[in-house]
Amino acid sequence: MSLSKNRIIDILLKCIPLVYAFYIPFSLYLYVYGSLTGKIDGIYGYYIDFVKILVILLFSSFVVRTSVSEKKNPSKHFVIFAGICILEIVFSVCIHGKYHNSGMVLTTVYLIFFTVEIIAENIAICQLYDTNDLDWKGSWTLLNASLIIILVSRIIFGDAVINLFILFLIGGVMLICREISRVCLILEYAYGKKKGESSEEGELSVQQEVGHDKKEV
């Protein structure tokens, strides 16, 4: 019975990176769609955000189980990322129904949250890799930096620097490229073969399973 439970846990554990890789951008675009069209009720937006936070924390737990680094704990950066998302929910709840004619104020605030979340997740994902792994990581960071520059320029200067149509056009293309890089980085960490780590990870997994079996016995 314990072996079957372990197998179920292993299967669920292996699914966490896939869920994290695709649900986070899905929740963002679903939220944007709901905001622009008004077809998604506000309460469902909170549900989407709560699931997003849960997914981030589950992936943080996955990183704790799979990380072999003794000098750093990459999972804590995902906890920070989740904390920022919680602050965004708290802000949304506090201002709900209070500001109907605020113009660009709320848009600016949410752009700031989005910018901070980009930075937090960029740091978290980069911490999963060594400093020498610059293939997808370099592209990911460059795209994030460029996107942040565009967002900050829009927040500070408004239409004087870049109008809304061009912002959506350029930002849309950059977001697509960013999400591709992001998915590649997450799946490579979760399922790719890491240099000098495969044997250690196998031993660590076996030790965890044996220890778990001993506790249940």
Image: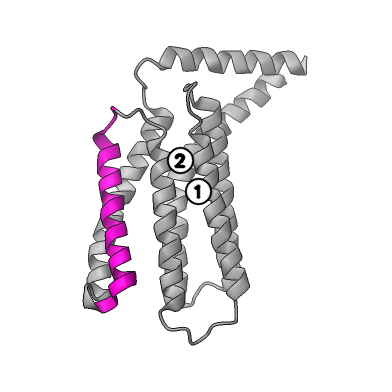
Mark 2, secondary structure of its residue: helix
Q: Is residue 159 visible?
A: yes
Q: Is residue 26 left or right of residue 99?
A: left
Residue 191 in percent (x, y) is at: 41, 29
Q: Which residue ends up furthest to the bottom in the rendered image? A: 101
**Is 207 located above or below residue 111 in the figure?**
above
Q: Is residue 132 left or right of residue 199?
A: left
**Figure colour scheme:** one colour
Q: Along the horizontal axis of the image, is 75 left or right of 211?
A: left
Q: Is residue 204 above or below residue 76?
A: above
Disc 2: CA contacts within 10 A as few (<14), some (14-19) or many (>=20)? some
Task: Give SS at disc 1.
Answer: helix
Whether 149 is among the magenta residues is yes
| First in sequence: mark 1 vs mark 2 | 2
Of residues 117 and 212, which is closer to you in this image?
Answer: 117
Q: In the depicted view, which residue is nearer to us: 132 or 30?
A: 132
Which residue is under mark 1? 81
Looking at the figure, which quarter contains the N terminus?
top right
- Residue with the mark numbered 2: 18
Q: Which residues are magenta?
A: 132-159
Taking the spot 57% from the left edge, 14% from the top edge, the residue there is: 206
